[in-house]
Amino acid sequence: MEKLKELPKIYDRRGNLSFIEGLNHIPFSIERAYWIYDVPGGQERGSHAFKTQHEFIVALSGSFDVVLNDGEKETRYHLNRSYKGIYIPPMTWRSLDNFSTNSLCLVLSSKKYDPSDYIHEFEDYWKIKKEDVLSFIEKDLSVRELIDASANEVLLDSCFGKSSIHDCKEFVLPQIHNIAGNLTSLNNNDDIPFEIKRAYYLYDVPAGAERGGHAHKQLYQFIIAASGSFDVVIDDGKETKTIRLDRPNRALMIVPGIWREVINFSGGAICMVLASEIYIEDDYIREYDDYKTLKDENRTL
């Protein structure tokens, strides 16, 4: 499988958008997402291999190199675009280096954090690679063939009518401090209360831009200011509230049935969203009057 993959890029003068869906753009279901930030220029990070874990790495901002080594050949990839990423299969030694100052690295993984899956020394990796690589891969059932995301009709979520802005929660996320760059990691159903099926992000955003006036019937969203800052305005048809997001370890969870807008972007901000569903157009409500009508009709159901 080709390791360097190009992602969808939706152009917009208010900021461009790219997205990654598990089992669509990448050949695994997303069980964990983490991101490395506050990285000083020139740093090296993450020299290790995984026995069974698959990864996909994207430079959300700035640039860095991903160096892959299968024990026989070393290949260097330079990542500097938000719409390109590197797929890394199990039992591949990988290192991250040559970071530009304040780069932002997003990693999507096929497994939750498991210290026993790491191989931290290259000598140990090469020994296992020669002896046991086939047994590890044969036991790994997390990866499936790539599938086409189907835009099936979406029914209203059971909480759509009754959900309010008070059901939307702010989170202070785990943060692992490191002089070479901080790291925040989220495991499905543990640190984030749903399964991540899609990650998308807004970038190249001009200062003061406004984005994302819509609601969802079934989708849960985890919104993070991966870089810079912006305001999220949430509206349940009766009340509104504005939440400021300005650090990569803070997030806002938005439940189905909430109208939301993202405004007051700082220049160059990156809005990252972890979503509970793949992209399905029928799940969107894009006109506020339609939202109000549907919300009022379903409040008493």
Image (cartoon, rainbow, N blue to C red):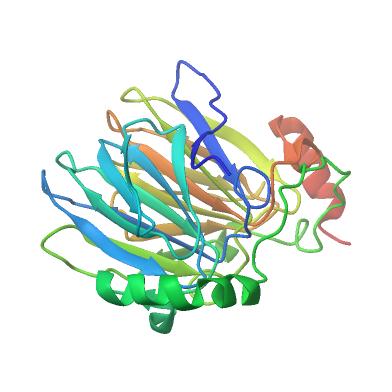
Q: Nearer the viewer, residue 157 or 173?
A: 173
What quarter of the picture does the C terminus occupy?
Answer: bottom right
Q: Is 36 situated left or right of 90 in this image?
A: left
At x 25%, y 35%, the residue is 62
Q: Is residue 172 visible?
A: no
At x 34%, y 72%, the residue is 125
Q: Nearer the viewer, residue 94 or 112?
A: 94
Report x, y in % for residue 127. 36, 76
Relative vertical location of residue 208 with respect to residue 138 in this rendering, above or below: above
Kindly indicate the quadrant of the structure image that contains residue 94: bottom left
Relative vertical location of residue 105 with respect to residue 7 in this rendering, above or below: below
Report x, y in % for residue 229. 30, 42
Report x, y in % for residue 26. 60, 48
Relative vertical location of residue 133 with respect to residue 27 in this rendering, above or below: below
What quarter of the picture does the N terminus occupy?
Answer: top right
Q: Nearer the viewer, residue 238 or 152?
A: 152
Q: Residue furthest top?
A: 13
Report x, y in % for residue 241. 48, 50
At x 37%, y 25%, the residue is 204
At x 40%, y 25%, the residue is 209
Q: Is residue 65 visible?
A: yes
Q: Is 217 situated left or right of 263 in this image?
A: right
- How many marks overall? 0
